[in-house]
Amino acid sequence: MIKNKLKSLNVRPQKSKGQNFLYDLEAIRSIVSFGEPTADDKIVEIGPGLGALTAELLNVVHDITVIEIEEEFCNELKVKFGERVKIINQDVTNVDIPGEDILLYGNLPYSRSSDIIQWVIKLKNIKRAVFLLQKEFSERIAASPGTKAYGSLTVAVSLWCKATLGPIVTGDKFHPKANVRSQVLRLDFFKEPKVSFTPNFERVVRGSFNQRRKKLFNSLLSSGFLREEIEHALKFSGIDGGRRAETLTTEEFGRLAEGFAK
Ligand code: SAM
């Protein structure tokens, strides 16, 4: 079915655009319901493809905008949904999402997961995001301190939202078949950042994880911070420079970043 549709649109699924299409209705429904949409929600869907998730979302809500990079899919969605869906034919990371308190959905192109997550956390008008991602990637975002999966992206996301893991979707539920497992990630955005935000937060976090296996002090040193400023920031925050970055909580990173700013 999907195969024939792609053929008639003359589109060959591209790996670089993450073009694997979900066809399993149960999986699609589990993604939709994990985001708990209600009739009044304003939904923006990233990468609707042939509209599998869109059709299911339309059973619950009526305000839907979709953003899709592939022009042929946009034309197809227009035929399929008519005026019921607003369609933006662009790379999502170049779009200013319209509206307030938006509920974002997306079975994301996995090659762009990292960019899209980093772009999403900078938006100020999202209340919740529900994404299907490669399982390991979702786990990375939802990881707890002290675990192997915990890293700079985990901390960057944790400043702006609470991450919860949802249903797992196996590769055979897609066409073409995906050779990895996927897992839903739900991000509930805070009204304010979790800790007082200083603009250097991301730089400090990235610097701390620069050399994961090294101690915090050395990792920061190797990423270009000066010895004196590191000593000052550690003293200000009361954090032992002999610890490893993966043991620090978001709150501790917040204090550390504040220490660098003062
Ligand atoms: N939602 C559909 C489904 O579940 O079957 C398709 C999901 S497929 C994994 C990812 C979709 O994102 C494709 O339709 C692809 O063309 C689109 N896409 C890829 N990169 C994009 C980008 N930068 N901006 C918007 N859409 C993109």
Image (cartoon, helix red, strand yellow):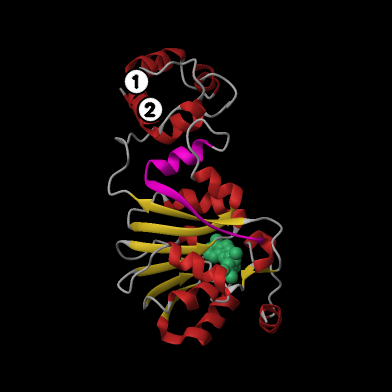
| Above or below, comparing residue 134 to residue 217 in the picture | below
The residue range painted magenta reads: 150-170
Q: Position of residue 227 (x, y in %)?
A: 46, 13
| Above or below, comparing residue 182 to residue 176 in the picture | above
Using the rendered image of the protein, determine whether residue 230 is visible from the camera's viewpoint.
yes
Residue at position x 50%, y 45% from top? Answer: 141
Q: Position of residue 168 (x, y in %)?
A: 57, 57
Q: For mark 1, what is the residue?
A: 237
Q: For mark 2, what is the residue?
A: 252
Residue at position x 53%, y 67% from top? Answer: 47
Amino acid type indicated by mark 1: Ser
Determine the quadrant in which ligand 1 lies: bottom right
Q: Which mark is residue 141?
A: none
| Secondary-structure class at tag 2 | helix
- Does the magenta run of residues contain 130? no
Marks 2 and 1, how far apart in space? 7 Å
Give 196 or 260, whichever is nearer the viewer.
196
Amino acid type indicated by mark 2: Glu
Side of 152 relative to 17 (left or right): left
Residue at position x 47%, y 21% from top? Answer: 225
| Secondary-structure class at tag 1 | helix
Q: Do the numbered discs 2 and 1 sit on residues whose CB atoms are within 8 Å?
A: yes
